[in-house]
Amino acid sequence: MADKQIKRIGVLTGGGDAPGLNAVIRAVVKTAIKKYNLEVVGFLDGFGGLINNMAKRMDLASVSGILPRGGTILGTTNRDNPFRYAIMKDGERAYVDMSDHIMSNLEEMQIDALVIIGGDGSLSIAREFWQKGLPVVGVPKTIDNDLSATDVTFGFDTALVTATEALDKLHTTAESHHRVMVLEVMGRYAGWIALHAGIAGGADVILIPEIPFIFENVCRKITNRKLNGKKFSIVVVAEGAKPLGGEMVIQKIIEDSADPIRLGGVGNLIGDEIEKCTGMETRVTILGHLQRGGSPTPFDRLLATRYGAHAVRVLMEGKFGYMVCLHGTNIESVPIVEAVKVLRTVSPDSDIVFAAKAVGIGFGDE
């Protein structure tokens, strides 16, 4: 299959949605048609579309007007791993490998190559398909910004803007009522959203997975602010933050998901502890899926467009099994195997953490 001349390509979006997905789809379709005279097929609802033959022909009209739209016109899901697909057998849940079934479907549909837009889970699946002989190119998507082979993933900037705007609004009500406001943001095992939004939004404390915190240190920071005349405080908490020697707060486990652990609720835990040890009224806001929604920022629209156009270019150059990426100001490509090897996390010794501490932001570690 990898030796065929490319005439028809497929595209799908997998994993959690992110602002900019439609911009990538638009760029893939327009580049494929206008630049290379290819046919494009869009698979619906992530890898489920490959399994169940849910697809539609994509033309220029199908991507008209979608550049500023959030979400994905193709639909997505963070379940339906083809290599561990959940079915009901004899009244019980069982898991089967549907990858050979998908390879046959693609052969019958004359799909010569596939563009897979997703985060580490979806790209790990893309890697497995490449190892089975399917020509694939990946596009890095996650608001968490935790893929190590690229400087930035699209969707992150929009989520960052949403979180920063939330902090701006929390400031006014916190100051008016002399309260502590805790904002819990997404990020899974990486603290990029919390760190960037916390600095941009003037937070007093930022708690991230990479720097385990001590409750007493967090409370001391807030109490000292009060003693110095600051009657309110803003705390930003990444969903994967954990106390020193403690564990992350798990909301639930989805067994048939590529990433089964769902984090959430650490903000309430921290809010209760702050109120208890400082005596200050504390309110918690969990930003949740607001970070995934809305129109992508100009930065994300531009990055997503560059990614989509380059993904088709990489396919046509025969560089299968690669992921497009941003290095500095240039769009390049790296092997998917390298792209999903490790998560990109915040270094406690990085210049951005230094800058945050230098302006007085606490991380609960000292």
Image (tube, helix red, strand yellow):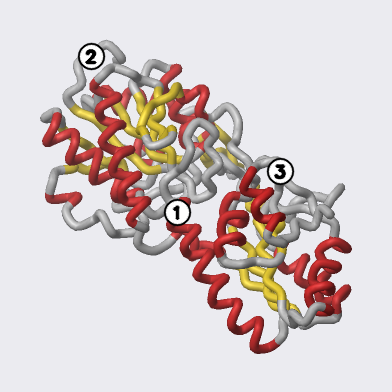
Q: Which residue is mark 3?
A: 348
Crowd class of label 3 (few under 14; some 14 to 19; many from 20; radius 10 Å) = few
Q: Residue furthest top?
A: 3
Amino acid carrying label 1: it is Asp
Tag 1 near tag 3, CB within 8 Å: no
Nearer to us: label 2 or label 3: 3
Q: Is residue 199 above or below residue 40?
A: below
Query: Measuring 35% from the left and 33% from the top, which residue is drawn there?
Result: 331
Crowd class of label 2 (few under 14; some 14 to 19; many from 20; radius 10 Å) = few
The answer to which quarter of the image holds residue 263 is bottom right
x%, y% of residue 326? 41, 35
Q: Quadrant of the C terminus?
A: bottom right
Q: Is residue 212 above or below residue 39?
A: below
Q: Earlier in the sequence, mark 2 or mark 1?
A: 2
Q: Which residue is mark 1?
A: 157
Give the number of callouts. 3
Q: Which residue is mark 2?
A: 4
Q: Calculate the distance from the C-alpha at mark 1 to the C-alpha at mark 3.
A: 21 Å
Q: Earlier in the sequence, mark 2 or mark 3?
A: 2
Q: Calculate the distance from the C-alpha at mark 2 to the C-alpha at mark 1.
A: 38 Å
Q: Earlier in the sequence, mark 1 or mark 3?
A: 1
Nearer to us: label 2 or label 1: 1
Q: Is residue 272 visible?
A: no
